Image: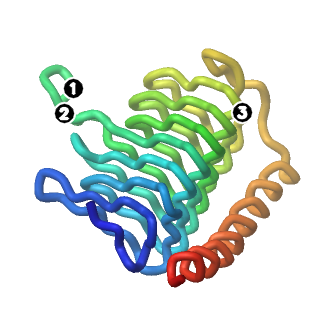
């Protein structure tokens, strides 16, 4: 296991000849585990006790995206009848709430996944769209841009207002700033 000096206390684990590629400005919290063919962009943050496991296919996370505490991210490989597989593709400025389960789907720039929500293989969350807390977006469901979906299984409730979308942008900025504070706090804690 590689406890990287850049990410003290985090588990950065290569597998099958693939090592995670993490931008130097990303924050990986202690207790987070990043495995395999993962790429994490500039200014993104993976918070405490998250698992980002790309042992069977690819996970791509854009810039300034945050994956909050306890979330699990995974993917599915190509197989007969599903030759393209289910990679996990997450855009820029995405908010993924605490304890979310995000699997083999696509989340466009500025998408939002609420606390404890589940997103399944080949589902799509559009730009500026919000999956409500506790919702389950089932396989191959597509949320359009600026839509709010809720429930298990999730269904469209309404179009999001400009104020709601501004609130998500404020959340992204908050997490980017908070990650900088945690980066300093973690370095201090692990330097003793």
Among the two numbered marks 3 and 2 on one chain, the one whose residue lies closer to the N terminus: 2
Is mark 3 in CB contact (under 8 Å) with mark 2? Answer: no
> x and y percent of residue 125 in the render?
56, 39
Residue for point 59% across, 33% down: 143
Image vertical order of residue 164 relative to residue 116, above or below: below
Q: Residue furthest front?
A: 192
Q: Which residue is mark 2?
A: 78
> x and y percent of residue 41 in the render?
44, 69
Residue for point 75% across, 67% down: 174
Question: SS for tag 2?
Answer: loop
> x and y percent of residue 139 in the render?
44, 22
Among the two numbered marks 3 and 1 on one chain, the one whose residue lies closer to the N terminus: 1
Is mark 1 in CB contact (under 8 Å) with mark 2? Answer: yes
Q: Which residue is mark 1?
A: 82
CA distance separating discs 3 and 1: 29 Å
- Which of the colour schemes (rainbow, by chain, secondary structure, one colour) is used? rainbow
Q: Quadrant of the C terminus?
A: bottom right
Q: Quadrant of residue 177?
A: bottom right
Looking at the picture, tell me which residue is in the foreground, 97 or 165: 97
Q: Quadrant of residue 106?
A: top left
Q: Nearer the viewer, mark 3 or mark 1?
A: 3
Q: Along the horizontal axis of the image, is 173 left or right of 9?
A: right
Q: Residues within 10 Å of mark 3 (few under 14, many from 20)?
A: many
Q: Residue furthest top?
A: 153
CA distance separating discs 3 and 2: 29 Å
What label sits on residue 132 in the rendered view? 3
Residue for point 37% across, 55% down: 34
> x and y percent of residue 58 in the render?
28, 49
CA distance separating discs 1 and 2: 6 Å
């Amino acid at each position: 296991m590689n406890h990287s000096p850049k990410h003290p206390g985090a588990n950065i684990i290569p597998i099958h000849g693939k090592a995670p590629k993490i931008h130097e400005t990303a924050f990986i919290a202690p207790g987070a585990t990043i495995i395999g063919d993962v790429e994490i962009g500039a200014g993104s943050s993976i918070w405490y006790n998250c698992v980002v496991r790309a042992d069977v296919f690819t996970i791509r996370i854009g810039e300034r995206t945050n994956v909050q505490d306890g979330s699990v991210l995974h993917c599915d490989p190509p197989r007969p009848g599903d030759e393209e597989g289910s990679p996990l593709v997450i855009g820029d400025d995405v908010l993924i709430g605490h304890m979310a389960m995000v699997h083999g789907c696509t989340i466009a720039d500025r998408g939002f996944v609420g606390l404890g929500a589940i997103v399944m293989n080949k589902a799509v969350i559009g730009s500026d769209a919000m999956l409500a807390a506790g919702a389950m977006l089932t396989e191959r469901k597509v949320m359009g841009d600026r839509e709010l979906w809720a429930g298990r299984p999730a269904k469209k409730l309404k179009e999001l207002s400009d104020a709601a979308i501004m609130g998500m942008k404020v959340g992204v900025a908050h997490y980017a700033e908070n990650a900088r504070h945690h980066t300093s706090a973690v370095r201090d804690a692990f330097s003793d």
